[in-house]
Image (cartoon, grey):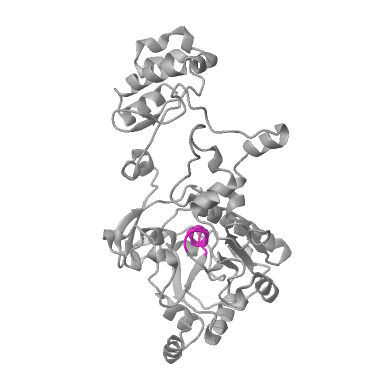
């Protein structure tokens, strides 16, 4: 979007590059899809004209930059020469082959980006970094506060030298405070946030979430804050730094537990051990379901659906009765649910306007008729990993003038240094001989 750059002048960019500010945003929505097998694809274009540099790796910074790329920003992923992003070594791998271009998390986290290699700690690399920063609107990084690979990447240096730059820094505990330099895995972040304490049964240890969700939450928050900072730049003409703490992003979800303690001085515990089986996972014939009494339907409707006559007992019709006779209801619920398949129960409950759910695995999601009808998945062709369906975006934007803003994967995850020639030679003006020398010096 041209307006996002309006008060942040840069030297003119060369034509025919994704994200260059002089391109018409409407024209920028269609690009050739040669690296995806041909055809014309539609890109979001909302952040067209915004250039993002991504430093760091693993999950949080790449996911933040991916979200910006999905909305049309020109994201350049900067990796260390030779080794690349640590996520390239993070399993699982396609065909169980631990190849740096077959890490499934890396493949997903880095779509719609261009990729280069750069060592900014070298003299030559520092010069290239300065040129890249001169053209950038956003820098996203997740290095520990005191472990930046170059002094030029220190937040104070960036905001002083490039006052129009938006700098998003993601760390486990933030840039300040006594824990600022502490490392944290996903389980540590979830535990430190207080979120884990509320998961599980009261007579057992707290339970964690899985799949590095804390880092995805941090990346999501960073992307939202970055977009807000870009809009503020339209008014002020200046960038700013964004300090994203993974733990605080999770702690901000404790909308009941923290006020509960603040107002009442009491710690909200985990759920009681004994219950009726409603509002929790229960076994069905082919998996797990979530029976519920939430909603406006009477108890008789729930009992009819489960199909056990004893559930029509008047003792169970009230909330207090379901607490008092929870164990008895639980046994009857087990009997009734054992006769149901998950999908059939979910459909039948929806027809009765009941709030039941089912636990879906990856295969269920991939074949889910609801997600398929909503065109959630995108097929991506990667030159090394091959073809696969990737999850799409959650939000769907209608777009201006009845032109839907469709999400597409216009680039698979880059190979290590795949776009060095395109960016260093075609955009920064280096010769082939220069690139050879830069490689010899270990700069790229």
Q: Residue at x 45, y 70 (%)?
A: 114
Does 100 sit above or below residue 121? above
Q: Which of 55 and 210 is in front in this view?
A: 210
Q: Is residue 205 left or right of residue 240?
A: left
Query: Where does residue 411 sit, x and y in percent of width and height?
Result: 40, 64
Q: What is the quadrant of residue 286 in the picture?
A: top left
The quarter of the displayed image where residue 11 is located: bottom right
| Residue 237, quarter of the rendered image | bottom right
Q: Range of the magenta residues?
A: 58-73
Q: Quadrant of the N terminus?
A: bottom right
In percent of the image, x 44 and y 71: which residue is there?
115
Q: Which residue is drawn at 52% across and 30% down?
A: 271
The percent position of residue 92, horizontal first and vertical second, equals 34, 57
Hey, which residue is sitting farthest top in the picture?
Answer: 314
Q: What count of labels does the image hold? A: 0
Where is residue 202? Give x, y as percent: 52, 32
Q: Is residue 42 above or below residue 268?
A: below
**Quick check: 132 left or right of 369?**
right
At which x and y percent is residue 219? 54, 56
Judge by depth and name the residue closer to the eye, 407 or 322: 322
Whether 189 is among the magenta residues is no
Q: In this view, does 194 lie above or below 283?
A: below
Residue at point 45% right, 59% down?
43
Tell which of 436 and 47 is nearer to you. Answer: 436
């Amino acid at each position: 979007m041209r307006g996002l750059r309006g008060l942040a002048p840069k030297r003119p960019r060369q034509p025919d590059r994704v994200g260059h500010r002089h391109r018409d945003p409407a024209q920028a929505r269609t690009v050739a899809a040669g690296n995806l097998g041909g055809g014309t694809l539609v890109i979001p274009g909302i952040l067209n004209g915004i250039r993002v540099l991504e430093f760091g790796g693993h999950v949080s910074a790449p996911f933040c930059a991916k979200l910006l790329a999905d909305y049309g920003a020109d994201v350049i992923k900067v990796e260390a020469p030779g080794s690349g992003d640590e996520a390239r070594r993070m399993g699982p791998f396609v065909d169980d082959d631990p190849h740096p271009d077959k890490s499934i998390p890396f493949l997903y986290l880095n779509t719609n980006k261009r990729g280069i290699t750069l060592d900014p700690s070298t003299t030559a690399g520092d010069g290239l970094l300065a040129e890249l920063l001169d053209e950038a609107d956003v820098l996203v990084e997740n290095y520990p506060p005191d472990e930046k690979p170059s002094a030029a990447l220190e937040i104070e240096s960036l905001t002083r030298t490039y006052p129009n730059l938006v700098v998003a820094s993601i760390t486990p505990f933030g840039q300040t405070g006594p824990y600022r330099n502490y490392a944290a895995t996903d389980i540590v972040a979830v535990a430190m946030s207080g979120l884990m304490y509320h998961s599980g049964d009261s007579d057992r240890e707290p339970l964690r979430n899985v799949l590095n969700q804390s880092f995805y939450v941090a990346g999501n928050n960073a992307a939202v804050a970055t977009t807000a900072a870009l809009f503020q730049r339209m008014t002020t003409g200046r960038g700013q730094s964004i300090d994203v703490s993974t733990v605080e992003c999770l702690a901000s979800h404790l909308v009941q537990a923290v006020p509960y303690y603040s107002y009442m001085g009491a710690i909200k515990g985990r759920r009681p051990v004994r219950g009726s089986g409603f509002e929790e996972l229960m076994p069905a014939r082919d998996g797990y379901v979530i029976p519920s009494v939430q909603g406006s339907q009477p108890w008789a409707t729930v009992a009819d659906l489960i199909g056990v006559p004893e559930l029509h007992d008047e003792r169970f019709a009230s909330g207090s009765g379901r607490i008092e006779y929870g164990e008895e209801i639980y046994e009857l619920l087990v009997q009734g649910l054992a006769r149901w398949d998950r999908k059939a129960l979910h459909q039948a409950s929806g027809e009765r306007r009941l709030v039941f759910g089912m636990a879906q695995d990856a295969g269920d999601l991939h074949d889910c008729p609801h997600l398929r009808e909503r065109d959630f998945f995108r097929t991506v062709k990667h030159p090394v990993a091959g073809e696969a369906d990737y999850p799409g975006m959650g939000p769907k934007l209608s777009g201006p003038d009845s032109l839907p803003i469709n999400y597409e994967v216009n680039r698979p995850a880059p190979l290590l240094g795949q776009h060095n020639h395109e960016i260093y030679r075609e955009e920064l003006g280096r010769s082939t001989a220069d690139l050879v020398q830069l490689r010899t010096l270990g700069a790229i």
